[in-house]
Image (cartoon, grey):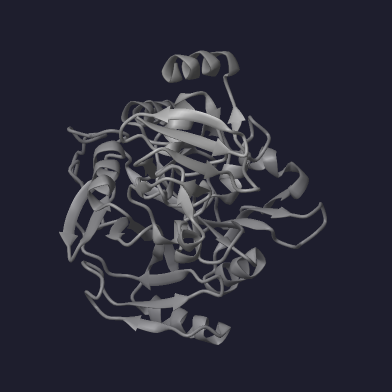
Amino acid sequence: MARITIVPDNVAVAARAGETVLEALRRHGYTMFFGCRRGGCGVCQVKLLDGAVHHGPYAPQALPQEAQDAGMVLACRAVADSDVTVEMVPSNRLRRLTSLWATAQTSSESG
Amino acid sequence: MGVMRLGFVQVRVTDMEAAKSHYIDALGLEKTAEVDGRLYLKGWDEWDHHSVVVEPGGAGLVKMAFKVDQEEDLSELEKRIEAYGLPVRRVHRHEDYAVGEGIVTTLPSGHVLQLYHEIEVLGTRTGRLNPDPWPDDARGMAAPRIDHLLVTAENPGQFTEFFTKVLDFKISERVVPQAGSDEILGAWLYRTNTPHDIAVIPGPNGKLHHFAFWLDNWQDVLRAGDIMAKTGIPVDIGPTRHGITRGTTIYFFDPAGNRNEVFSGGYITYPDFPCITWTADELGKGIFYIQRELNDRFTTVLT
């Protein structure tokens, strides 16, 4: 099970096999600004600081070469192949939607 | 009489098999052909060969095609478009599968616009003689037909001018900065008797906001929402109602991230239908009448 750490928030969640970064965050009660969830629009780009991911299908314009070169990945399509650390872009931020539930869920999975 | 209606939209997708599952199984469109890697689709109540063409290559709009009333309209509109200052290319018969001769131009907004008259007619399964109201074996949302599309342009006023002055569209509703202003920030344009066949809002050139399928009523919109939930289709917003057009709606995404809409209701338009005006400060209500506010996803997510 890959561990996904989000900075600057230093939130860590455990991803199930095949689960995208965005899916793992949402399952743990977190959210961020995202769009189509299908790799088409590119608004959920985050920066991969450490570790490796692979992407499900996405449109080239959603993650252009310059963005890839800058280490960007699509949260809705990136699946962690190892423990990873990703950074939110300045225009996006991680938010906790369901605090109590998320606390219980995170501690039970990471415990 | 010029442009008759929206004929088809051609879009790119990242995964053809996923697109088939979405458009055929979930939306309930009929596959009419699969040729040279492109998938041709129509709603069960559409007579012509296709209203949606899907091809591999990412996401976004390849082109939008409108059907004209008479073959002669093509040369007349070709002259008008050239007089407006845009180059026009002739599309040869069957250059597009099942479609006859046409003309194509790239608008100042970067969108590719095709006009055609002839297209293969397949008919419907209910037929033209003593027909039943709907066909058996309808699938999923069972969308009967395409309704309209919405695109973004850096200069929505110029886009609107082209459609009204060159193609004789009329404006059902428009958004202006404040009451009394004639500066068009967004426009809903029609040639049929619906509130819109195409609409434009501000945004980057060449982008697709969504294309929409008609459903007969609000209950069918809710049922479509149930199907989205059952099949895991990401929803943008809805079910809700638009202030502009008064239609009821759900926005959702296809497997490549192109936004679709199911749309029902709204009024009818006609040649002396007056233009309705919304001021920018009331746009939240204009777009989402019940929520009364725009959200970032609706305004920024485009393909």
Q: Residue at x 57, y 19 (%)?
A: A98
- In this view, the residue in front, B81 or A13, is A13
- In this view, the residue in front, B40 or B165, is B40
The image shows residue B164 at horizontal and vertical percentages of 59, 68
The image shows residue B170 at horizontal and vertical percentages of 58, 61
The image shows residue B213 at horizontal and vertical percentages of 40, 44
Q: Considering the image in quadrants, where does the N terminus of chain A appear?
A: top left
Q: Quadrant of residue B160?
A: bottom right
Q: Is residue B66 above or below residue B283?
A: below
Q: Considering the image in quadrants, where does the C terminus of chain A appear?
A: top left
Q: Is residue B162 above or below residue B151?
A: below
Residue B272 visible here:
no
Q: Is residue B200 above or below residue B36?
A: above
The image shows residue B86 at horizontal and vertical percentages of 52, 83
Q: Residue at x 40, y 42 (%)?
A: B214
- In this view, the residue in front, B266 or B254, is B254
Q: Quadrant of residue A37?
A: top left
Residue B71 visible here:
yes
Q: Residue at x 61, y 59 (%)?
A: B203
Numbered label tally:
0
Side of B222 relative to B287 (left or right): left
